[in-house]
Image (cartoon, rainbow, N blue to C red):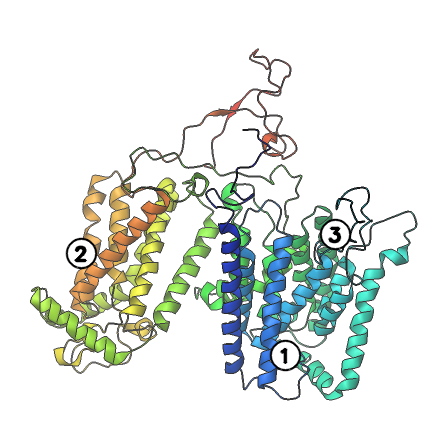
């Protein structure tokens, strides 16, 4: 079949196997899910925020009212629709993503901003971003075309010339956004001028910026005349020291205020930082727009507004999400670091990123949104499209040597099953975020005391039937063991499970990098499955069942915080499954299947055995909790195998052997075959190479050693 003909029933740009009839249905389903989730979250959060006044000015007399909630609900739906459609019409260059991803991403960001701040501020913040993108993106507004003459084809010679590309002058939408958020005036200098012609003057080229400023001034004047009290209250709120110093204020002024600066030094330093950030961001934004990275250009300039504005909320971090479309890094494994960090900071609260280690938490992590916005606006070296490092391909994993146990395995393509050593900072971020999400969900699980106690009695009855009820005997031995052994057991229970997991992860990453991804995926999958048990089956530990009389401390000892302050802050009715046992078995399995030292393989099973004795003797878990921990670990192994086709038992070489690849002259130490304007064509005619072989151009081949 000729290459120019498409396969009937297929859709261009869609994954293989996706029929033309299914693509619109999937896209429509994504839009329905995004809008339904937005409507539900917005209506609920607006009702919960009945006692709080939003920071942005609202043209309403009383807050809240049913009419106000309905109006903001309509605005939220319009904002999600507009943001998803604009990104879909102007996707990041080089990103292959289904069209249904953009409305889901817009809805996720709006819901996250509503949960972390005031919902009205979130809705108006996303609305202002949509208004800015309408004027900034080249395809922000749909073009108008004059219908052709009767009897002529749409694009034939009889077609009339197209009308101006916008239904109203460029700059009007931006002017409305500036009236709502004055710091967005920076985008007036970033608006693209009209196409240059012979009679284009400097005034005509600056017409969009002048239009935006004029519209903003007009709207602010009308609002001031209509309700002077509301305008004065809004300006007073922006100058309020308590609002500026609030931890939720993600601006440079807020960070400097929380550092203890005040008075003229604060104003002078903030002015200098804001002026430098604005100048550098505008310069970088113009360069990126000329490189046709329009979303990244908007994100860079928008990050500068976080530095210039006195007050900003979670909704203003949408510019950080747009800046996440930029490309950084010299290795394929480094390419995902910046998008993951930017998206994580923009969507999740800072508490999930805070490991509680000072001064790292106080100086960096709690100020991560502001620092990342400043870096994106001024310093990060985003790749240009003509950069030889624009295209970086991962070394794909070799095909499995054994026949798959399940049909259709592996599910992930080879480029997503790489086994090279990942970026260290990215792994630390994923581990911290994963543990933060796990702790949050575990502690947020319903604390149903009666249900958890009934489940505990039923489980103990099952253990008695199976002759597994060893908890009373082990707890009695533990209480008679002495104070030193009891303190050691309590310290082991509270700290060892997390410390040992980190040590094994570090060992795999540094000494056995080809096994690291497999072990990490098993651990994350098992932990995620355990969260389902915490929510669906609340279970009281043996020490919280009154009639059993099991204790974690001797009679008469103080009952301040059972097993330390850490246990006092956790949900004590999330005992099934026991992740102490699951994580301990994972550590033993990872070590035993990776190391070649026989003594280490023999000693590895001792760790889960000791952990089992401690968690049962201290009356924190039932015996069947340990069985549940082993079950979720096995399920995690199944998930990892279905995704990648690899097992923890695999000992064959994970990386393919180096093979010679044809290259041309290198640019900055990297092969020119990575450049999009010089594709690798070994069959092109040219002079004989150094080995005397005809039909090749450039220096001789060199092996591709992968990513190390």
Q: Residues within 10 Å of mark 1 (few under 14, many from 20)?
A: some
Drawn side of residue 132 relative to residue 247, left or right: right
**Can residue 575 be seen?**
yes
Q: Position of residue 604 (x, y in %)?
A: 22, 49
- Judging by the rendered image, the residue that carries numbered circle 3 is 286
Vertical relation: 57 (above or below) 592? below
Q: Nearer the viewer, residue 262 or 436?
A: 436
Confirm whether residue 112 shows in the render: no
- Where is residue 338 shown, x and y percent of the image? 55, 52
Which class describes the residues within 10 Å of circle 3: few (<14), some (14-19), or many (20+)?
many
Label 2–label 3 contact, CB within 8 A: no
Mark 1, secondary structure of its residue: loop
The CA distance from mark 2 to mark 3 is 62 Å
- Given the current orientation, which residue lies at the most extreme front position? 151
Q: Where does label 1 land, which residue?
A: 55
Q: Is residue 508 left or right of residue 267?
A: left
Q: Which of the two discs, 2 and 1, sits closer to the camera?
A: 1
Query: Exactly how many numbered labels are in the figure?
Result: 3
Q: Which quadrant would the C terminus be assigned to in this image?
A: top left
Question: SS at mark 2?
Answer: helix
Q: Estimate the spatial distance between the alpha carbons at disc 2 and disc 1, rounded to whole Å.
A: 56 Å
What residue is pinned by disc 2?
609
Which quadrant holds residue 570?
bottom left
Q: Where is residue 48 drawn, in percent x and y? A: 50, 81
Residues at marks 3 and 1, CA–CA distance in whole angstroms: 31 Å
């Amino acid at each position: 079949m000729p290459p120019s003909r498409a396969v009937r029933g297929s859709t261009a740009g869609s994954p293989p196997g996706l029929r033309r009839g299914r693509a619109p249905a999937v896209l429509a389903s994504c839009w329905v899910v995004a809008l339904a989730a937005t409507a539900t979250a917005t209506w609920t959060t607006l009702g919960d925020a009945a006692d709080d006044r939003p920071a942005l000015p609202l043209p309403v007399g009383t807050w809240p009212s049913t009419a106000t909630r309905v109006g903001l609900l309509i605005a939220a739906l319009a904002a999600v629709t507009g943001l998803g459609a604009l990104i879909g019409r102007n996707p990041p260059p080089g990103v292959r993503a289904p069209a249904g991803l953009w409305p889901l991403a817009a809805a996720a960001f709006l819901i996250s901003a509503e949960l972390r701040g005031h919902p009205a501020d979130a809705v108006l913040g996303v609305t202002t971003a949509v208004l800015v993108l309408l004027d900034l993106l080249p395809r922000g507004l749909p073009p108008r075309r004059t219908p052709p003459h009767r009897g002529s084809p749409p694009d034939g010679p009889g077609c009339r010339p197209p009308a101006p590309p916008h239904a109203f002058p460029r700059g009007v939408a931006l002017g409305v956004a500036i009236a709502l958020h004055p710091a967005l005036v920076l985008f007036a200098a970033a608006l693209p001028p009209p196409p240059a012609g012979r009679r284009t003057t400097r005034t005509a080229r600056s017409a969009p910026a002048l239009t935006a400023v004029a519209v903003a001034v007009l709207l602010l004047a009308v609002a001031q005349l209509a309700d002077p009290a509301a305008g004065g209250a809004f300006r007073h709120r922006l100058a309020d020291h308590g609002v500026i110093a609030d931890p939720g204020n993600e601006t440079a002024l807020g960070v400097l205020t929380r550092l203890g600066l005040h008075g003229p030094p604060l104003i002078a330093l903030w002015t200098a930082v804001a002026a430098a950030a604005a100048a550098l961001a505008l310069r970088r934004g113009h360069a990126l727009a000329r490189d046709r990275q329009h979303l990244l250009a908007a994100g860079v300039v928008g990050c500068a507004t976080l530095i210039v504005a006195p007050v900003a909320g979670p909704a203003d971090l949408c510019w950080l999400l747009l800046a996440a479309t930029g490309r950084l890094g010299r290795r394929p494994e480094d390419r995902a670091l910046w998008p993951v960090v930017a998206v994580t900071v923009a969507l999740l609260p800072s508490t999930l990123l805070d490991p509680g280690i000072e001064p790292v938490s106080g100086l960096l992590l709690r100020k991560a949104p502001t620092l990342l916005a400043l870096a994106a606006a001024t310093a990060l070296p985003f790749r240009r499209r003509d950069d030889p490092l624009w295209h970086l391909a991962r070394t794909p994993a070799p095909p499995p040597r054994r026949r798959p146990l399940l049909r259709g395995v592996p599910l992930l393509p080879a480029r997503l099953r790489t086994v090279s050593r990942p970026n260290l900072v990215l792994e630390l971020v994923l581990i911290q975020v994963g543990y933060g999400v796990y702790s949050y969900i575990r502690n947020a699980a319903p604390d149903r005391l009666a249900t958890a106690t009934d489940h505990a009695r039923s489980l103990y009855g099952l253990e008695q039937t199976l002759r597994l009820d060893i908890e009373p005997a082990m707890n009695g031995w533990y209480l008679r063991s002495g104070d030193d052994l009891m303190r050691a057991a309590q310290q082991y229970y509270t700290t060892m499970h997390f410390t040992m997991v980190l040590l094994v992860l570090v060992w795999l990453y540094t000494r056995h990098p080809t096994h690291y991804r497999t072990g990490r995926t098993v651990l994350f999958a098992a932990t995620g499955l355990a969260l389902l048990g915490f929510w669906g089956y609340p279970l009281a530990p043996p020490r919280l069942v009154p009639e059993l009389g099991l204790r974690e401390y001797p009679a008469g000892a103080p009952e301040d915080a059972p097993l330390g302050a850490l246990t006092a802050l956790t949900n004590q009715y999330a005992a099934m499954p026991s992740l102490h046992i699951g994580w301990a078995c994972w550590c033993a399995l990872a070590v035993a299947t990776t190391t070649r030292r026989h003594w280490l393989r023999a000693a590895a099973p001792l760790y889960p055995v000791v952990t089992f004795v401690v968690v049962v003797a201290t009356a924190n878990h039932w015996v069947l909790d340990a069985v549940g921990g082993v079950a979720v670990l096995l399920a995690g192994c199944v998930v990892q195998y279905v995704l990648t086709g690899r097992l923890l038992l695999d000992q064959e070489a994970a990386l393919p052997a180096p093979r010679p690849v044809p290259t041309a002259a290198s640019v900055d130490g990297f092969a020119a075959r990575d450049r999009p304007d010089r594709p690798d064509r070994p069959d092109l005619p040219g002079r004989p190479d150094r080995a005397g072989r005809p039909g090749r151009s450039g220096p001789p081949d060199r092996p591709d050693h992968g990513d190390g």
